Amino acid sequence: MERKEWPLWEVFIRSRNGLDHKHCGSVHAPDATMALQMARDVYTRRLEGVSIWVVKAADIVASDPDAKPELFDPAEDKIYRHPTFYQLPEEVNHM
Amino acid sequence: MAADMTQQNTATAEHIEYVTRLGDNALILGQRLSEWCGHAPVIEEDLALANIALDLVGQARLLLTHAGKLEGSGRDEDQMAFLRVERDYRNITMMEVPNEDFGRSTVRNFLFSTFQVLLWERLVQSSDRELAAIAAKSLKEARYHLNHSAEWVIRLGDGTAVSHDKTQAALYYLWPYTAELFAANPTDEAVSAAGIGPAWSELEAAWEAMVLPVLAEATLVVPARTPFKSYGKFGRHSEHMGHLLATMQYMQRTYPGASW
């Protein structure tokens, strides 16, 4: 039998102007319009945000958890990629 | 403060009645909607309905506090909300009829929030400055209630055969009660003449212009007008009101003056 469940939507909230949208959870909703409203009602009840994005969870392309060794481990011994080794000139010392 | 005092001393019975009607509509629908808490079809909608209920209870607090001040007898919001007898509540009857199912509750929210949006838009200009301030705050809330319930009416009406039938049944049930919103009465005439707010009958054409396209998109049949009349705003309520009040007033009557 066909299961008629609403699709899952991932919810991203921007807490203030100038900041990034951050993932904060998910909602079930029949379509995009309702997903936005559901996200508003579930995740912005305490003034958490000024903007909401919703994305169908099925549309997110995720990396394979089993591929972690080849994807991420090789960066482990390359600490020179952090910019902490550079001497900054006086004029830019507030970076 | 000076303006407040003047207003208290000059508040007419009609002015108090008008504000009390506004407050009681919000209070009684807020109470009805709060019955959904923990019972809505999905948790997302459970929160949405609780949010709307809380918005309405918040409006009721402001309006009934204001009504209490206008009448000048020292009644605060709790006394207004919880310690009146049934005949003294002035909500329209549609607010008190049972939720029945999600379809009826949604259709009622849609029909009433449309009315509220139109009324708050006008009351922002009220000569009663306290009422105008309440209207400005409440208008934003009502616009969301309308948006949310209209989207649902469309999806339920134009959804499955079951959701369509339930929504259509809800519309048949509720439609006759909407006549009470616009029925002419001396309170409205006096208040309108004083510049406090519109006679509700003035809003009927605009209300229909907003409601009918949504119902059409939802593939719902709009019922014909009938001679049926309800009189909740005159204090003559349906058989459902006493039960609602028994639940709502229980705490305050059992523990008078309780606060938390």
Image (spheres, coloured by chain):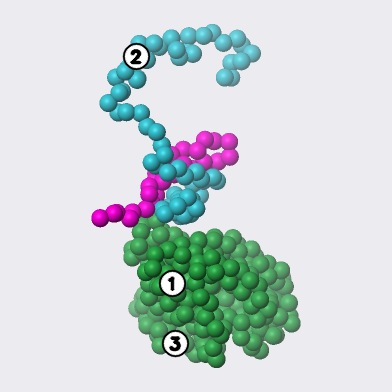
Chain colours: A cyan, B green
- Give the residue at the far left of this rendering: A1
| Callout 3 secondary element | loop
Inspect the image, locate mark 1, and give the three-letter code of the amino acid beneath it.
Thr
Report which residue position mark 1 lands on: B167
Dot 3 crowding, Cα within 10 Å, few <14, some 14–19, many 20+:
some
Give the alpha-carbon distance from disc 1 to disc 2, as whole Å: 59 Å
Inspect the image, locate mark 3, and give the three-letter code of the amino acid beneath it.
Ser
Residue B73 lies, in percent from the top left, at 57, 82
Dot 2 crowding, Cα within 10 Å, few <14, some 14–19, many 20+:
few
Can residue B23 be seen? yes
Inspect the image, locate mark 2, and give the three-letter code of the amino acid beneath it.
Pro
| Callout 1 secondary element | helix
Residue B246 lies, in percent from the top left, at 37, 81
Q: Do labels 2 and 3 share a chain?
A: no
Q: Which of B178 and A15 is in front in this view?
A: B178
Residue B46 lies, in percent from the top left, at 39, 61
Q: Which of A79 and A92 is in front in this view?
A: A79
Vertical order, B177 against B152 (above or below): below
Q: Mark 3 lies on which chain?
A: B
Dot 1 crowding, Cα within 10 Å, few <14, some 14–19, many 20+:
many
In this rendering, which labeled residue sits more in front, label 1 or label 3?
Answer: 1
Per the rendering, the mark at residue B238 is 3
Q: Quadrant of the N terminus of chain B?
A: bottom right
**Residue at (46, 67) in percent of width and height:** B157
**Residue at (61, 82) in percent of width and height:** B182
Residue B137 lies, in percent from the top left, at 60, 62
Marks 1 & 2, CB-CB < 8 Å contact: no
Question: What range is drawn magenta here?
Answer: A1-28
Report which residue position mark 2 lands on: A74
